[in-house]
Image (tube, grey):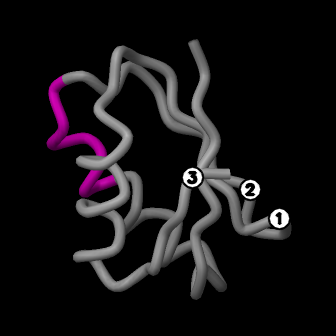
Amino acid sequence: MATVFNVEKMMCGGCEANVKKVLAEVASVESVEVDLDAKTVTIEGAIDTAEIVKVITDAGYPTTLA
């Protein structure tokens, strides 16, 4: 099941790479799609949404569940 998050402050490919890097460390994440224009991240996997919000926010990108 895909879960979409609104991620603020993503501006460039570097931001996208940083978000993907921190999410790669979360065991339950199966795949990640980033849409820089919409400032969203779509994640596949049996994830804990609160954990995902914390991980991305702690990386410097304030995040909410879409």
Q: Is residue 59 left or right of residue 2?
A: left
The residue located at (58%, 87%) in the rendering is: 9
Is label 1 in a helix, a strand or a loop?
A: loop
Instruction: Tell which of 35 and 4 is nearer to you.
Output: 4
Left or right of 8? Residue 52 is left
- The x and y percentages for residue 64 are 53, 63
**On screen, 43 above or below 45?**
below
The answer to whether residue 38 is above or below residue 57 is: above
Q: Quarter of the image holding residue 33?
A: top right
Q: CA distance from mark 3 to mark 2?
A: 15 Å
The residue sitting at the right extreme is: 37
Residue 65 is labelled as 3
Q: Quadrant of residue 8?
A: bottom right
Task: Give the amino acid type for the residue marked by disc 1 in the picture.
Answer: Ala
Q: Is residue 23 above or below residue 16?
A: above
**For the residues marked 1 and 2, what is the alpha-carbon distance in whole angstroms?**
6 Å
- Residue 20 in picture, x, y percent from top left: 39, 52
Q: Which mark is residue 35?
A: 2
- Whole-percent x, y for residue 66 in the image: 68, 51
Per the image, the residue denoted by label 1 is 38
Give the class, few, some or many, for how many residues have Cα within 10 Å of label 2's Cα (few <14, many ≥20): few
Percent x, y of residue 45? 40, 17
- Based on the picture, tell me whether residue 16 belongs to the magenta stretch: no
Q: Helix, strand or loop at disc 2? A: strand
User: Which range is magenta?
Assistant: 21-27
| Near-viewer residue (56 or 50) | 50
Crowd tier of the residue under label 3, counting other residues whose Cα lies within 10 Å: few below 14, some 14–19, many 20 or above: some
Label pair 1/2, CB-CB below 8 angstroms: yes
